[in-house]
Amino acid sequence: MSSRASTFAAFGTAVALLTLTACSSASADTTSGPAGTVPAAATSSPDAGAPPGAEILGRPGVGEPFKLTIDYSNTAGLDEFEVTVDEVRCGEPLDPKALAHAAEPGVEPAPEESKQYCVVSMEVTNVGKSEADWSADDAVTLNVDDTAYSPTQSDNELADLYAQYWSDQGKTDPSFGINPGSSSPEHGIFQIPVGDEPTTAWVASGNLLETIDGVEPGYLVQLDSAS
């Protein structure tokens, strides 16, 4: 074989090796996922769980108090509360002491098919100047990422059983009105899919999530540290 033929043969071998190396590298790059995918953390929004268009007044964590200021259009006064989300428990039996106040004690309520109960326990303090009332029934959602769950009518009836139990302990439910300087527990009961874990709770700075004037501002409570 001539020296020129040997040169071309060596060149061809080098090109083949480079091509195999490039293909191997490209194959390794695609093993992490299909083209165009991004990590889940990069697609999540820090506002997930807040109603679209709502002003976020803060992002407190579990155990961190925040202030609700409720302004009524037909009165000159303001209702002011300090609220703390103490705990969120999902997939556990409801408090038997609260269920003892049911119309049929001893009958264990059941969530909808493929759902689990979640109990949100809060502490509510009246920091205003007069008696005022507030309820979680229509002002709180429990969220799994950007999916918001509101309590059903039956969920609110179960929350009423918790209120009756605490009333027996001398703690009036905030929905019936509490005086300045008084604190009471408040409970919200929600149903979310089995296997899901709540990520945030939205607490509106008002008695309703939305009024005729639009979506109420509120707080996006971070539940990462909830147990």
Image (cartoon, rainbow, N blue to C red):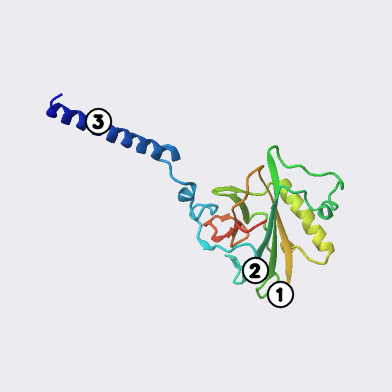
Q: Answer left or right for 133 relative to 222.
A: right
Q: Position of residue 99 (x, y in %)?
A: 82, 51
Residue denoted by label 2: 81
- Judged from the image, the secondary structure of the residue bearing numbered disc 1 is loop
Label 2 vs 1, first from the N-terminus: 2
Q: Answer left or right for 13 relative to 196.
A: left
Taking the spot 71% from the left edge, 75% from the top edge, the residue there is 181
Q: Which is nearer the eye, 111 or 23?
A: 23
Residue denoted by label 3: 13
Looking at the picture, which amino acid does disc 2 mark? Phe
Disc number for residue 181: 1
Q: Quadrant of the N terminus?
A: top left
Measure how far apart labels 1 and 3 are at the Cα level: 86 Å
Looking at the picture, which amino acid does disc 1 mark? Gly
Disc number for residue 63: none
Label 2 vs 3, first from the N-terminus: 3
